[in-house]
Image (tube, rainbow, N blue to C red):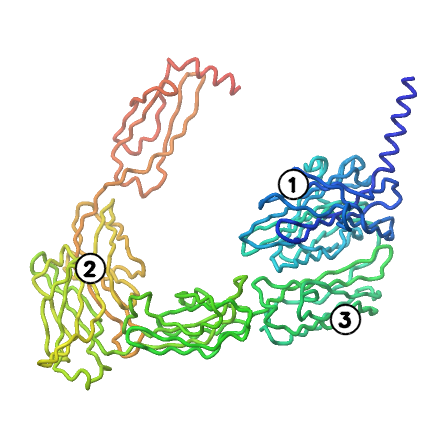
């Protein structure tokens, strides 16, 4: 009886091992229907002769529920391969599901077993096929459909010849896709034990952007399975993935693959016609067939055209044509894929070529800028693309001369332009720039560009640059420079330009300048310190102030001083003197400065007084707000001042604008500890001693070391105490005998030996 049962077991085992093994490849995809309801499709490729047919499969939805999904299509292909499609086909067939809430769900299917003999899956005959897809339901990102994979996951390769494959993933929502390789999964969704990537004499990799798989080159005949993950991204946020399990069969052949001519990525202005001739050749002169696929051929409205398939002996070509339109504009590029296959035997070899096309909206046209007091009015034509969402407005001081590359959209940061506003109505084609209510500053040539933006954050080409200067109907302050540094007798020179563009009929004169001062770099306490009555009198020296300890702010008010008709016309912006501070450290003084001025600051030149000549020498130039003067002598006093260089971007102003800080004094101080030494040691078990030595980490840290102290602790957690001290900084070796540590050393030696 036992022999009978054992024989029966072997028979059953053999039956399932040979006839219940059939799964070759597959994937799960989904599409959104409404609300939280989705429809799923499972695609599998199986071994045709196997009687272990699957008219239905169980799908787990990732929310604790599952459904039985019926097969709606089966196609028997050459080479004992069957194509199977499982999806919704009416009530009771499964495949549609309403999820309980937003979240991330893992859709999965597990079915025994894979076909036997897969080289890189040990014991594949007993390993289940596991497929999974990640579905993210996020109401803030909108509805989502998974990528659709247009190329079958079954392919053939020639031994010792480069093998290429591309899943030809197409995203119906226009989301960005990325590709990666991963281990195949088996029972319970776990990585298959012993799985390995197919060996290659050069590389086995996938292009993360195009999805092109390169196996260069197969080394052993047989069947291999690999997994490709296609991740989906929307506005830089991950929103799901499809995991494809595919099979590659390697056989012996002498054929060489055909080659598609290289194609460069490109950008196309929406509304223009794009045409490109696609060419392929075969080194063996075989008959080759050229086909294409990708989003441009599937999009509506206005899909591209590519006559296919086309055949030729040794060479073939066909023309890809796309009449682009505004509806095609989106941030992510469109991927177009081409495939050429020869008629070689026993394996038809292929070549793939993918390239990206970005459709860019035209720039807003006829941007103009018109000054209005301390504001500037902007106006432009409505975008030619009615599907644009609105506009973004950029500003900089001074003309740049931007000429974008054909793939350069928006306004890049390197131009110095900064976005100052966004308008969310395509019909709103005017903007008043008042600097967020603070008013613009006279003396600057304000330049603007405008771009249209779209719901997916795609941006058009930039408009023309339009520039304008505010009318100079009030003074413009140009200099606030310290002339003398003193705690009571300091002085500051203030310079401004006279107004040139005011209406002399409305403002007949005589005129008066009122000079205001406030202490510090900010604050509200403003003091009227003087006035000048001549329009040409634009220089003033403020005296008897403490320039050693404080910076000062100044403002010039312009008045019409006609008797009986006295009124305020306008003011300069506030401008401060440069205030220099010194921070001492070991052999170093760090200089830092503060200022608040209406002109553009360019650079700072640092001066240090020579103690021998008492003259000031330039020791450096920087565009930052600090400077470290190193190599100084501790305890010696040094004196500095800095010279600011700046400019206004408008024409008619002196350039550069030079302003000096007060003089500042400081002494370097050794307030930094030396760098900790690097301590090393060895154990001498025979003489029961430790030999210790140390060295400095940084030579710059040892110029003021005067002694070393060596600390010792009898055990972990015990206090440390000094066991060695030396005033000789060259003494970096010590060998103490530690008798009471004898047992520890013996244990250490036993372990060591």
Please give the residue where the numbered disc 3 appears in the rendered image: 307
Q: Is residue 189 above or below residue 482?
A: above
Query: Vertically, is 152 above or below 671?
Result: below
Q: Residue beneath label 2, please?
A: 641
- Mark number for residue 719? none
Q: Secondary structure at mark 2?
A: strand
Side of 125 relative to 135 (left or right): right
Left or right position of 547 against 192: left
Eye-nearest disc, 1 or 3: 1
Q: Earlier in the sequence, mark 2 or mark 1?
A: 1
Left/right of residue 402 with respect to residue 112 in the rendered view? left
Q: Residues within 10 Å of mark 2 (few under 14, many from 20)?
A: many
Residue at horizontal 64 percent and vertical 76 percent from the top: 273
Q: Nearer the viewer, residue 229 or 326?
A: 326
Residue 301 showing in the rendered view: yes
Q: Mark 2 and mark 3: span between their CA atoms?
A: 75 Å
Q: Which residue is mark 1?
A: 62
In the rendered image, residue 419, in percent from the top left (x then y), is placed at 41, 65
Mark 3 crowdedness (10 Å alpha carbons): few <14, some 14-19, many ≥20: few
| Label 2 to label 1: alpha-carbon separation | 70 Å
Residue at far front of view: 91
Q: What whole-number distance in Å separates the C-alpha atoms at marks 1 and 3?
A: 42 Å
* Residue 734, quarter of the rendered image: top left
Residue beneath the point at 72% across and 63% down = 293
User: Element type at marker 1?
Assistant: loop
């Amino acid at each position: 009886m036992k022999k009978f049962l054992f024989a029966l077991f072997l028979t059953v085992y053999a039956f399932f091992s040979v006839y219940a093994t059939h799964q070759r490849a597959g994937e799960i995809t989904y599409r959104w229907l409404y609300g939280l309801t989705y429809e799923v499709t499972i695609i599998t490729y199986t071994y045709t002769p196997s009687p272990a047919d699957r008219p239905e499969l169980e799908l787990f939805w990732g929310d604790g529920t599952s459904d039985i999904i019926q097969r709606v299509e089966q196609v028997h292909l050459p080479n004992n391969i069957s194509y199977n499609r499982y999806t919704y086909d009416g009530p009771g067939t499964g495949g549609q599901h309403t999820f309980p809430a937003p979240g991330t769900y893992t859709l999965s299917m597990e079915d025994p077993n894979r076909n036997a003999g897969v080289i890189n899956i040990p014991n594949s005959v007993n390993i289940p096929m596991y497929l999974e897809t990640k579905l993210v339901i996020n109401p803030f990102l909108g509805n989502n459909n998974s990528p659709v994979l247009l190329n079958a996951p079954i392919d053939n390769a020639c031994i010792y010849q480069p093998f290429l494959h591309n899943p030809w993933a197409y995203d119906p929502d226009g989301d960005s896709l990325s590709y990666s390789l991963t281990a195949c999964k088996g029972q319970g969704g776990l990585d298959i034990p012993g799985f390995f990537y197919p060996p290659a004499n050069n590389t086995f990799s996938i292009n993360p952007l195009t999805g092109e798989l390169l196996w260069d080159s197969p080394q052993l005949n047989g069947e291999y399975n690999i997994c490709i993950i296609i991740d989906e991204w929307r506005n830089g946020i991950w929103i799901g993935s499809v995991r494809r399990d595919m099979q590659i069969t390697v056989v012996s052949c002498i054929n060489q693959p055909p080659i598609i001519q290289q194609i460069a990525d490109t950008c196309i202005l929406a509304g223009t016609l794009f045409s490109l001739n696609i060419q392929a050749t075969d080194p063996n002169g075989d008959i080759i067939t050229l086909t294409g696929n990708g989003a441009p051929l599937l999009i509506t409205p206005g899909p591209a055209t590519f006559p296919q398939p086309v055949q030729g002996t040794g060479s073939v070509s066909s023309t890809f044509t796309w009449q682009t339109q505004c509806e095609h504009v989106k941030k992510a590029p469109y991927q177009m894929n081409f495939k050429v296959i020869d008629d070689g035997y026993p394996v038809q070899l292929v070549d793939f070529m993918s390239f990206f096309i970005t459709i860019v909206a035209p720039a807003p046209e006829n941007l103009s800028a018109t000054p209005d007091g301390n504001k500037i009015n902007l106006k432009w034509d409505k975008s030619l693309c009615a599907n644009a969402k609105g506009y973004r407005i950029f500003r900089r001081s001074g003309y740049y001369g931007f000429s974008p590359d054909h793939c350069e959209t928006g306004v890049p940061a390197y131009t110095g332009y900064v976005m100052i506003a966004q308008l969310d109505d395509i019909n709103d084609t005017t903007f008043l720039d008042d600097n967020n209510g603070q008013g613009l500053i006279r003396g600057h040539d304000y330049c603007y560009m405008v771009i249209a933006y779209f719901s997916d954050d795609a941006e058009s080409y930039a408009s023309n640059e339009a520039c304008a200067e505010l009318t100079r109907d009030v003074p413009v302050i140009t200099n606030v420079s310290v002339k003398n540094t003193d705690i009571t007798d300091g002085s500051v020179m203030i310079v401004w330009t006279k107004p040139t563009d005011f209406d002399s009929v409305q403002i007949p004169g005589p005129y008066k300048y009122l000079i205001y001062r406030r202490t510090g770099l900010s604050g509200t306490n403003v003091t009227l310190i003087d006035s000048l009555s001549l329009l040409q009198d634009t220089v003033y020296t403020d005296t008897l102030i403490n320039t050693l300890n404080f910076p000062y702010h100044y403002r010039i008010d312009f008045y019409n001083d006609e008797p009986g008709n006295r009124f305020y016309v306008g003011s300069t912006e506030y401008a401060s003197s440069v205030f220099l501070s010194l921070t001492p450290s070991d052999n170093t003084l760090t200089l830092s400065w503060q200022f608040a001025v209406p002109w553009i600051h360019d650079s700072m030149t640092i001066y240090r007084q020579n103690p021998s000549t008492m003259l000031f020498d330039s020791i450096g130039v920087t565009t930052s707000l600090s400077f470290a003067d190193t190599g100084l002598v501790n305890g010696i006093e040094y004196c500095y001042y800095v010279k600011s260089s700046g400019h206004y971007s408008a024409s008619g102003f002196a350039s550069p604008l030079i302003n000096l800080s007060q003089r500042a004094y400081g002494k370097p101080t050794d307030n930094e500890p030396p760098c900790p030494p690097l301590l090393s040691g060895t154990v001498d078990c025979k003489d029961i001693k430790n030999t210790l030595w140390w060295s400095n980490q940084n030579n710059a840290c040892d110029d003021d070391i005067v002694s070393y102290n060596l600390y010792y602790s009898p055990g972990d957690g015990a206090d440390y105490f000094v066991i060695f001290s030396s005033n000789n900084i060259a003494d970096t070796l010590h060998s103490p005998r530690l008798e009471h540590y004898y047992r520890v050393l013996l244990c250490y030696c036993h372990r060591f030996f």
